[in-house]
Amino acid sequence: MEHDITKPEHRHPEKQHKPDNPIQRKPEWIRVKAPTSPEYQETRKLMRNLNLATVCEEAACPNIGECWKQKHATFMILGSTCTRACAFCNVATGIPDQLDPFEPARVAIAVQKLGLKHVVITSVDRDDLVDGGADQFVKVISEIRRLSPATTIEILTPDFKDKDGAMEVVARARPDVFNHNLETVPKLYPTIRPGARYFTSLDLLNRVKKVDPTIFTKSGLMVGLGEERMDIMQVMDDLRAADVDFLTIGQYLQPTPKHAAIARFVTPEEFKSYETLARGKGFLMVSASPLTRSSYHADSDFEKLRKAREEKLAVV
């Protein structure tokens, strides 16, 4: 068989020269069971049959067993190879896949077959594309609405760095939730998220509201990477200044020895404290726990988010 030169020998070729960071044993509060349910197998089969990628698999999410048992999957569009090389991420990096014109239709078919009331669509970074993949997001939103008009849509986009007008194109498609994760605190960007810029990401979230104030905005942070409590509090303030509605905070888990090391495991009590702080700062919705991820319980959280806004407007 001829070797495919477009695919790297390693999933993360840019990390191979780095020294190993031993993977620490997880504390009791963060261990999960291996996925074995029939529903998990059915969901996996559907994704393979439709040739779709999910961030649940590609990012090695610890909640995949629980979510797929309920047939809740987060779709990852624009291929499965990222043009960035973040120190925390398990998604493969290298030469990206060719843009698939049939991907939006296949995603919409999967959403319909799974009977999703709420769906989360994310993507790899596509710095190689003129629009960063914005048009593909729009097409996916359009196809889902065509086949499943009652389904609410949450998108988790890249930062669209240096892609003028890309965010605006996606926002004008009016997703119900526009999510973009800051991922970590500003001082850790050079080592954890070197291809991104903190204020670029923050500005993107701020500009979404200027395009359409009715769109819910959302962002997420990982903890346990070496940040301090005051760093997290400052990010909360920055997000509220950008009128972000929903904040998620979860424990960073190291995918391989070549990824960034875990500085520490944050306790459930600390997560509860972060949740209390964030609610006090005015977020409509907060999800903070060791296993919280951007799309974890996204369907039920969306209902809570919508209800929180209704209650807030009723008071005003």
Image (cartoon, grey):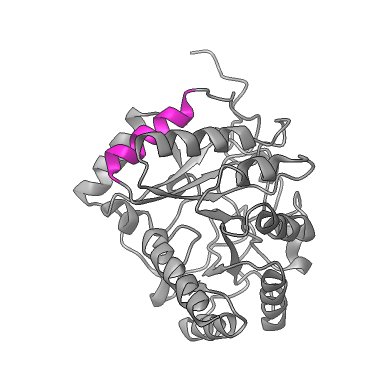
In this rendering, the count of numbered labels is 0
Is 2 positioned to the left or the right of 180 in the image? left
Residue at horizontal 44%, vertical 75%? 27
Where is residue 229? Give x, y as percent: 67, 82
Q: Quadrant of the C terminus?
A: bottom right
Q: Is residue 190 visible?
A: no
Is 264 positioned to the left or the right of 62 in the image? right
Q: Give the quarter of the image for residue 10.
A: top right
Residue at horizontal 58%, vertical 25%? 99
Where is residue 119? Give x, y as percent: 41, 49
Work out whether residue 119 or residue 254 is closer to the camera in this orientation and state it: 119
Is the residue 26 above or below the residue 269 in the image? above
Residue at horizontal 70%, vertical 76%? 237
Is 106 a magenta residue?
yes
Q: Main secondary structure of the magenta part?
A: helix
Q: Which residues are magenta?
A: 102-115
Is 160 a magenta residue?
no
Where is residue 202? Give x, y as percent: 73, 61
Residue at horizontal 67%, vertical 46%? 15
Is 128 positioned to the left or the right of 120 in the image? right
Where is residue 188? Give x, y as percent: 74, 65
Q: Is residue 150 visible?
A: yes
